[in-house]
Image (tube, rainbow, N blue to C red):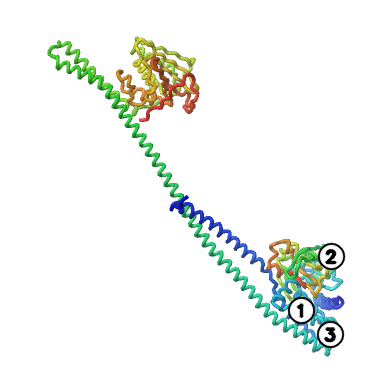
Amino acid sequence: MSLTRPTVLGYLVPLLAIIVLVILLTVTLYRLTDIQRAMRNNASANMTWVIYQAHTESLLLTNAVQQSLIAPHQESNLAHRYQMLLSRIDVLGDGPQKRALEAMGLAEPLLEQANAAMQLGPRFERGHIDAADYEHTREVLHAFSDLLQSASGRAMRTEWEEAGARLDIYRNAVLTVFFLMIGIWICGAVISIQLLLALKKTRDNERIRLRGIELQRQLEHERRISELYRSFGSMVSHQFRTPLAIIDATMQRLIRAGDRMTKEEINHRAGKARQATQRLNQLIENILQADRYMEQLDVSMQPCQLAELANQAVSEYRTIAPKRDIRLVDETGGNSTAQCDSVLTVQILGNLLSNALKYSDEDTGISVRVSCQADWVCCEICDKGDGIAVHDLPHVFKRYFRAPDATDIVGTGIGLHIAMELATLQNGDILVCSERGRGSCFTLRLPCSPQHFRQSHAHEPGPAPTRIDRGNV
Amino acid sequence: MQHTITQGWRLLLATSLLFGLAIAGIRPAFASGNTNVRQLPPPSGDVLLIIDGAITSTNDGTEAHLDLDAIRSLPAYSLHTSTAVTDGVKHFEGVLMRDLLQLVGASGAMVEAGALNNYSVDIPIADFHDYDVVLATHMDGKQLLPSDKGPFWIVYPRDEWRQLQDIRYDYRWVWQLNRLTVK
């Protein structure tokens, strides 16, 4: 991996920041536990107080000694005061206090003096002091008191030193944590900025992707429109050329041999030209009407018997083409209820029937079969014409599409397109299957009931018809 | 040594007796004013602990004067714990402070504990209900004496509760305890 600028900025910097952050957090945590531990270890002996207490008891004992000397016959509290001093000496000699005194270098002289005082114990317990003993007793107790007095000063200094040192430790630790926190703050900021940048980049990428999809969609739309124009051009060129050619040829003939023609012949030829003109007009009218028709469409869905609608359409075409053999078969057993608009459905069936009649020979029959398949009610209209080429099948429902081999039959390529649109409006569709030389079958499928809209119908019985998506214009 | 200590306590006893006689005159009036007052048996030995203040059981005016027998009449309790002023874990024997306060019918929020050296500290009575605080008479099997930390030492179960390992509890460990005032 080469160290390019984006690599450094995108990966190395945040990675480094995270590592540093983890290290800083760990060190901070360690320092904080240090402080916490140091704070708990503050149970040092309160030496100033202990020494002060011993000093007081020593002075009180001295006082009691003097009292006993001044008033030898009074009840003396020498013994009690001595007990109290003993108790203080006992505390001084106990573990924590003794260690503190040792640290101050006071343990040995103090305990030595304490021992000297305890040597005098029997005198105090006796309850009185003789004049002979007084001087020595006073000296011993004074020496002890003096030593305790200076010791209390030393103890105070030591304790203050310790307190100062402890505060130093706390202050340094807090300062360290303070700087560590600044480091953590900086690392956090770096990571946050990286995150924000990454987020922005993701958003930008998403926007670019959506823009790409939109462009793709527009391109597709453009492609469809251009295809539509091509189909339109192709249809116009074929459909309009024939009548134009008829008109042109008739006019040439009239120009060239008009003076030799009888009036009847001229009329006959002019009539042909006019027919061609009418056809042109009809074509144009059909094209314009198709758009208007789709715009003004009003769909009213209700349960209808498809077999009855098929019968209507068939009857109509039997009148139009009385010579053709149109057979209607109802395989539903009398129940072919579909959810649809009856008028639109008859129009679809009419369109399919007219196509069947148009694209097959006069002496061939047309079969119309109504059946139920899963959630669908179907009406299949089959002819025995030339069929549709396999490569044309996917295009038959596209607007203005005319199969190249059927251009001699008049048509705009709008009929099937509209039929499919109408079927879709009713939640149905039209399937087509065809075989060259044997004929074509168009099947209108409509949903049985309102709940069963077409969702997924993977299983189609019989030969799988080619499912054609309607051209999207 | 034991002999002279007894002497000392005798002195204390004498003083308290004198004090008791002095207030004897007002005692009936006090008793009739407070019907809840319960009489404690008079001490037969040296009075080691005086309890006064908001208490209902007394044996000397408004005070309860307790000797070692009176203390020992309460359920014995023992406890192992370290202390702030000694090394290692010590074994204390004595009675629970809450039992003692119940004995004298104490009602209040605080107890002022006083020691032979005039040290005094206010202890919340809640401490005695929250923790098994002991009025120790013995340490490591040896009776506490005024020459060490006797006659009584208030001992907290320091090793059982982390919050008791705090200098703010250490000063409640009154040794040479000789007086309690319920407030």
Q: Is residue A346 left or right of residue A275?
A: right
Is residue A415 something that shows in the picture? yes
Q: Position of residue A170 (x, y in %)?
A: 60, 68
Residue A225 position (above or below residue A133): above
CA separation, marks 2 and 3?
A: 37 Å
Counting other residues with Cα less than 10 Å from the Cα at mark 3, is it few (<14), some (14-19), or many (20 or more)?
many
Q: Amino acid at mark 1?
A: Leu
Q: Are the residues flagged by discs 1 and 2 in contact, CB closer than 8 Å? A: no
- Amino acid carrying label 3: it is His
**Considering the numbered disc 1 on the image, is that residue within a helix, a strand or a loop?**
helix
Residue at which label 1 appears? A111
Quadrant position of residue A105: bottom right
As displayed, is residue B73 above or below residue A424?
below
Label 2, on which residue?
B73
Q: What whole-number distance in Å separates the C-alpha atoms at marks 1 and 3? A: 25 Å
Q: Indicate the position of residue A257 as horizontal and vertical percent values.
A: 14, 14
Which tag, 1 or 3, sits closer to the chain's start? 1
- Which label is found at residue B102? none
Which residue is tagged 3?
A128
* Depth order, front residue of B65/A154: A154
Q: Secondary structure at mark 2?
A: loop
Residue at 48 percent across and 19 percent down: it is A462
Mark 3, chain letter?
A
